[in-house]
Every structure is written in structure tokens, then in C-alpha cells.
Image: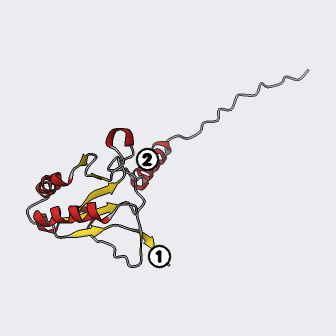
Amino acid sequence: MSKFKKKTKVEVNIPTSALPDIIFMLLFFFMTTTVLRENTMLVDQKIPEATQLQKLEKKTLISYLYVGKPKNTAMYGVEPRIQANDALINTSDIALWVNQEKDKRSESEREMLTISLKADREVKMGPISDIQFELREVDARRVLYASVGKLD
């Protein structure tokens, strides 16, 4: 009789040395492509379309004012309101807000501060002209009117 040799078990190991590198590459990819929302919108926005647009180079010098009907109409009513930095403000508070925004910037950037006015297309011109007047009083003369896409 012949003797049979027992087969030895073969271990199959999956190399995991490159796994942390792959995980960190995915992490960096998602960190660089994800856009975080800066403000919680408290007003409805339907931005009007424009016929001529100009792109800004330095977006760090822009502060945003949103004008529109409040989302919570039971608490704030249906009249257009102004939102600045996650808070609803009145037109009389714009001067204080602009000064706070200028204080956040360095000395050389304070005069280059641009106020971007994102107004709903349904807002009448009365509140917009009140905002413009308050901005003139504080010497915030660089005003940008935001719009959506180019009209063809």
C-alpha cells in the first residue's frame, strides 16, 4: 500500500499595507470637493437673471445681505426682511453690521469691502433703496447686485 501525503493548508493573505494610503486619498478628495454652507437661509431667494455679468476675483472681501420674504411667516410676517450673517436685521441696523464687517477685515482691506445684495426678484424697490441709503450713510459704496446665470 502506498502512503498518501497530507496536503498542507495554503494561507492566502491579502496585503493591507496600502489601505491607509487609499483611505487618506479618499478623505482628502472629499475634503477638497465638499462645499460647506456658510449661512442658514432665513429668507426665500429667487435671484433674478442678468444680461451682463462680471466675475469677482477676491471673494474674501465680500459680505452678503439677503433680502426676501421670510421662510417663517408665522413669526416674521410676509413683508420682505434683510438677513445678514444668520440673523434678520432692520434697515437701521445695517450701519452697525457694516462696521462689524469692516472690523473683521485687516486695515488695508476695510476700504475694499464689497456688499453683495442678493434680493429676491419679487421684492419691491422701496426696501432696496432704503438699504442703498443706509449703505451710503456708512460710506459702503462698493455694492454688488447678485444675479443668476446669463440670459440668452
- Count up the numbered dots: 2
Instruction: State the SS at label 1.
Output: loop
Which element carries disc 2, helix, strand or loop?
Answer: helix
Whether residue 61 is visible, yes or no, is no
Answer with the quarter of the image where residue 2 lies: top right
Q: What's the residue at 34%, 44% (across, down)?
A: 77
- Left or right: 74 as drawn, with respect to 4: left
In the rendered image, residue 110, in percent from the top left (x then y), is placed at: 12, 63
Q: Position of residue 41 (x, y in %)?
A: 36, 49
Q: Is residue 87 left or right of residue 8?
A: left
Q: On the image, which quarter does residue 49 sit in?
A: bottom left
Q: Which residue sits furthest top?
A: 1
Could you classify mark 1 by the number of other residues whose Cα lies within 10 Å: few (under 14), some (14-19), or many (20 or more)? few
> Can you give x and y, in whole percent of width and height, for residue 22 in the image?
48, 47
Q: Which residue is mark 2?
A: 27
Q: Amino acid at mark 1?
A: Leu
Which of pointers 1 and 2 lies earlier in the amino acid sequence? 2
In the image, 92 versus 102, the foreground residue is 92
Q: Is residue 143 above or below residue 41?
A: below
Task: Indicate which disc residue 151 carries.
Answer: 1
- For this rendering, which residue is in front, 149 or 35? 149
